[in-house]
Image: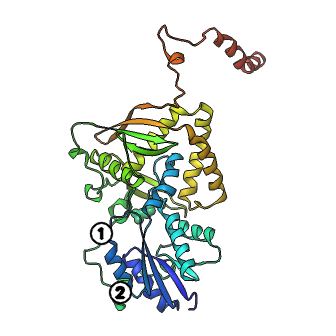
Amino acid sequence: MGRANKVVLAYSGGVDTSVCIPYLKEEWGVQEVITLAADLGQGEELGPIKQKALDSGAAASLVEDGREVFVTDYVFPSIQANALYENRYPLSTALARPLIAKMLVEAAEKYGADAVAHGCTGKGNDQVRFDVGIMALNPNLQVLAPAREWGMSREETIAYGEKFGIPTPVKKSSPYSIDRNLLGRSIEAGPLEDPMTEPPEEIFAMTTALAETPNDPEYVEIGFEKGLPVSLNGQALSPIELITQLNEKAGRHGVGRIDMIENRVVGIKSREIYEAPALLVLVHAHRDLESLTLTADVTQYKRGIEETYANLVYQGLWYSPLKAALDAFIKETQGAVNGVVRVKFYKGNATIVGRRSNNSIYSPDLATYTSDDQFDHKAAEGFIYIWGLPTRVWAEKNK
Ligand code: ARG
C-alpha cells in the first residue's frame, strides 16, 4: 500500500498489462493510473487499445506514435554498429525498450507522476531494459513491476481481471509469447521450449515458407549515406518506408528467420525464433559497404566495438556512459560509408553480390593480376624481411 500516487504504465492491451491497472490501484494503493501505448509499428489497432485501458480503470489513456524516432534514433545507429547479439540476433525487440522507457519517463514528468510501471515478469530481459533505462533517464522515478511480484498463474491473472471487468481473451490463447514491432517478430514458449522441435510454419507472419518462395531471384540495391540506409533501387525513401518495403521484399523470399538458443541477462538460456528480414539484410549490407570503404585497422577494431555494443543493447545499458562512448567511435567511422550494395534474394538467402562507392578504397590498379598491375612486387621482399625479423631471431635462438 501507498507505493505511489500517480503512475504511468506501459500498456500493450494484453491481459497482463490490463490487469496491472486494477492491481496497482487495489493492491498497491495507487490513486491514478495513466496508461501509455507506444506505437512502434506492431500493426495493432491502437483505437481499441486506448478504450480498453479506460475500461480497465485507467484515469487517462495515452497513445503515441514512436515509429519515426524508433527507426531514426534507435534502429539506424544499431545498423551502423552492425549489432548482432551473439553474432545472430539483430536486437529487434531489445531496441524498442529504451525508447519505450524514454516515452514513459517523459509522460511521467509531463503529468507529474511519481512512478512508472510495466507488466514484465522477473524472468526476462525486458524488465532489465525498462528498469535500467528509466533509472538512467530519471533516477527519482520509482519503477513498479506488479507482474514480478503478484505470483499469479495465467488463469489466476485472467480471473483477477474478470473481477474488474477485464474481458477474458476471446481466442483460445496461443501457446506462444510473441513480441512484434516494425522490425520484426520474436516468438518463444509453447512447443518451442524444446530446442529439438522444429519451428512450426504457423508461427511465421513476415517470412514466406521456403517451399512457397518465388522461383526467380529478386535483386535490390540499397543506398547508404554516412552508414545510414537512404534508398532502395535508386528511390529515396523515408526510414519507415525503407524498412517496410525491405521487410516485404526480403520476407517474400523467406529471408530473415533466426532460430537460436540465447543467453538472457538473468542467466537463463532461452530458445527464441525471430523474423527480422529488413534489419538483418541492412546489417549485412552495411557491413559489406564498410569492407569497401574503411581501412583494415578501423574495420577490424570496430568488430570488437560492435560486439560490446550489441551486448550493451541486449543487456539494457542503452543509456550508459560506455554506450555513449561507443556511439561516438562509431559515428566517427561512418563519414566514408556511402554507396550502394546489391543484394540477391533467393530461397531464404540474402546474398550480397555487388557494392560500389565514391569512397571506395579498393584499388583495381593494385588488386589486378593483369598487365595493368601497379603494385611494386619487389618492395615486398624488404617488407617481409623486416616483418618476419622478430620471428627469425626467435627461431635462430630456439629451434
Ligand atoms: N529474447 C528477445 C530479447 O530479449 C525477445 C524478448 C521478447 N520475446 C517474446 N517472445 N515475447 O530481446
Q: From the image, which quarter does the C terminus lie in?
A: top right
Q: Nearer the viewer, residue 41 or 251?
A: 41
Label 2 SS: helix
Residue 369 higher or lower than 294, as above or below: above
Q: Nearer the viewer, mark 2 or mark 1?
A: 2
Q: Nearer the viewer, residue 229 or 165?
A: 229
Can you give x and y, in whole percent of width and height, for residue 259 in the image? Answer: 38, 51
Q: Which mark is residue 296?
A: none
The single residue placed furthest to the right in the displayed view is: 397
Residue 22 higher or lower than 109, as above or below: below
Establish whether ligand 1 lies closer than 8 Å to the Cβ of label 1: no
**Residue kind at label 1, given as amino acid type:** Ser
Can you give x and y, in whole percent of width and height, for residue 6 in the image? Answer: 54, 86
Can you give x and y, in whole percent of width and height, for residue 39 in the image? Answer: 40, 67
Q: In the visual, does 383 lie left or right of 238?
A: right
For marks 2 and 1, give the CA distance. Answer: 24 Å
Can you give x and y, in whole percent of width and height, for residue 64 in the image? Answer: 43, 71
Picture quarter containing residue 352?
top left
Q: Residue at x 59, y 83 (%)?
A: 114
Q: Residue at x 57, y 46 (%)?
A: 306
Q: From the image, which quarter does the N terminus lie in?
A: bottom right
Numbered marks: total: 2
The single residue placed furthest to the front in the displayed view is: 236
**Residue kind at label 2, given as amino acid type:** Asp
Q: In the visual, does 215 lie left or right of 258?
A: left
> Quick check: can you spot residue 125?
no
> Quick check: can you spot residue 389?
yes
Q: Which mark is residue 174?
A: 1
Q: Residue at x 57, y 78 (%)?
A: 109
Q: Which residue is mark 2?
A: 55
Label 1 SS: loop
